[in-house]
Amino acid sequence: AWNYYKVAEFVENRVFTFSQIGSTYHVTYTFTKNGDSTDLEYHEWVDEGELEEPADIYNLQLLKRALEQKKTHPTKSESGETGTKRNL
């Protein structure tokens, strides 16, 4: 089954947040230039309860590599939500 999301926040080259339609699940990707690399912070959370299946680190590393190959170097935006954060 497919999950559908809406874009809840978007700042070009910095951050984007998706909210799952019909769910309390959200995910934010924040990017920070770090020399010739890009730091990727992945933050997922639910408004109620606990995450059922946190993201796979392998897929996040693939996303990070793909962004770096395109020479995308955004800056960081701070978020006040709580949840799982991963810095790659």
Image (cartoon, grey):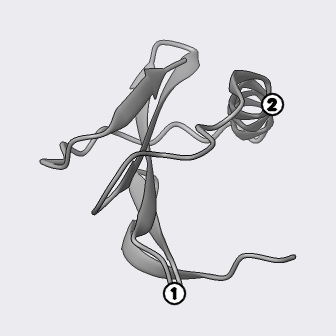
Which residue does the image show at 53% across and 85% down from the upper left? Answer: 21
Q: Quadrant of residue 41?
A: top left
Three-letter amino acid code of the residue under disc 2: Leu
Q: Residue furthest front?
A: 49
Disc on the earlier residue, 2 or 1:
1
Which residue does the image show at 48% across and 46% down from the upper left? Answer: 51
Which residue does the image show at 80% across and 30% down from the upper left? Answer: 62
Using the rendered image of the protein, determine whether residue 13 is visible from the camera's viewpoint. yes
Q: Is residue 18 above or below residue 37?
A: below
Q: Residue furthest top?
A: 35
Query: Where residue 46 sits in the image (x, y, percent)?
Result: 37, 57
Disc 2 designates what residue?
Answer: 62
Location of the N terminus (image quadrant): bottom right
Q: Is residue 71 left or right of residue 17?
A: right
Q: Is residue 57 left or right of residue 45?
A: right
- Residue 53's disc is none
Look at the numbered disc 2 and give the secondary structure of its residue.
Answer: helix
- Residue 22's disc is 1
Q: Using the numbered discs, state the Cα–Cα distance from disc 2 to disc 1 in whole angstroms.
A: 28 Å
Three-letter amino acid code of the residue under disc 1: Gly
Using the rendered image of the protein, determine whether residue 12 is visible from the camera's viewpoint. no
Q: Residues within 10 Å of mark 2 (few under 14, many from 20)?
A: few
Q: Is residue 69 left or right of residue 21?
A: right
